[in-house]
Image (cartoon, rainbow, N blue to C red):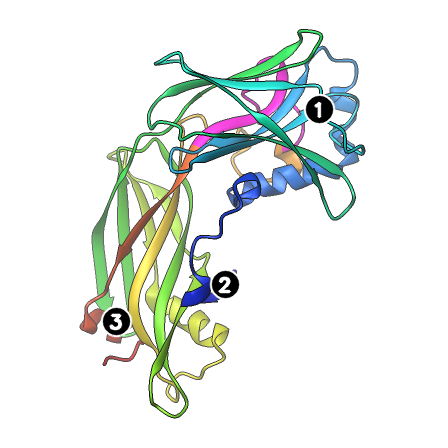
Amino acid sequence: MMTQIKTMSEAGVFSMPLLRLLPVFLVAVLLVGTGCEEAVDPVLETDEAFTLYGYLDPSADMQAVRVFSIDGMLQNVQAVPLDASVRTINRATGEEVVWRDSIITYRDRTIGHIFHARFRAEHDTPYQLLATRSDGRSSSVDVRTPPDGEATISNIFSARSQVLVELAWSNVPRVIQAEVSYFVSVPFPDGTDTTTVRVDIKSARVAENSDNTWSVSILPSGDIGVIFSALQLQPGRDTVFLDNIEVRAFVTSEDWESPVGAFDPELLVQPGTFSNVDDGFGFVGGGYFDTFEFQLTDEVARNAGFSIR
């Protein structure tokens, strides 16, 4: 279980459009694809032009996709512009957007090409992404962005030292991961005031329901132990007040489903294994983080182990 602590001054959105956080498994696929020599053989002697990884995000004003040329291995070593022209076409309106290349040097000195464009993709809309070489060879992918979902609290089970909160996301094709943030207040040692801290915990569980909704479950009574540990506090001695809870679910297009049953980067990075790119390799989907924020009643918060003001 991973945790991250932020004070409220640090908890604002950190804007890095070209390298913004992708879902965990997709980041792993990109990293493996950067330097994994096992990916060499399957792309030798092929007519495909590019490997593409990324997603169109209806919640963001900047879109970004990583592009690899297929030239023997998925590894760039020279900081020169890629022989690629990248554009998207909105299939519903015909609007065309040209993307720009950004050359990124990673810590291992390999080179990455992140193509980006400043526009907000529409929800539930078909797009085509095309990458074309100067010789006319191209790779393309058709993507439908997911609709704007709706989140509600479907159930709260509350008993002493056992609190379970279930949320339901409806009108969405798929939810593949979720995480929870607890905003808590901790008194100063002298008791004069409190400081508010955000603790991020990757403990939410995702499941598909029989009515085609998606369930995200969190266990505040279990997460409180992680919160005390992360803040280096001791239950029974130190006071922690719960202000509110934020759950972020990554909503995706219908085709975002692993063919191997799990998002194992060692398997999915192999060209053609997890791919929806025509005349190329890789995967480009539609996705966005949908956020739902709520508060627990004093009784439920107390049952979870938090102090009450």
Nearest to N terminus: mark 2 or mark 1:
2
Q: Nearer the viewer, mark 2 or mark 1?
A: 1
Which part of the image, by quadrant, shows the C terminus? bottom left
Question: Which residue ends up furthest to the bottom in the rendered image?
Answer: 190
Query: Which range is magenta?
Result: 269-286
Q: At 37% across and 87% down in the image, what residue appears?
A: 236
In the picture, measured across the screen, residue 276 lies left or right of residue 75, that is left
Q: Residues within 10 Å of mark 3 (few under 14, many from 20)?
A: many
Residue for badge 3: 301
Distance, label 2 to label 1, CA atoms, is 37 Å
- Quick check: is 164 in the magenta stretch? no
Q: Nearer the viewer, residue 200 or 98?
A: 98
Q: Nearer the viewer, residue 87 or 158?
A: 87
User: Can the viewer see residue 86?
Assistant: yes
Q: Are marks 2 and 1 in contact (CB under 8 Å)?
A: no
Nearest to N terminus: mark 3 or mark 1:
1
Nearest to N terminus: mark 2 or mark 3:
2
Badge 2 marks a residue whose secondary structure is strand
Q: Residues within 10 Å of mark 2 (few under 14, many from 20)?
A: some
Q: At 67% across and 9% down in the image, what residue appears?
A: 137
Residue for badge 1: 82
Q: Quadrant of residue 199?
A: bottom left
Residue for badge 2: 3
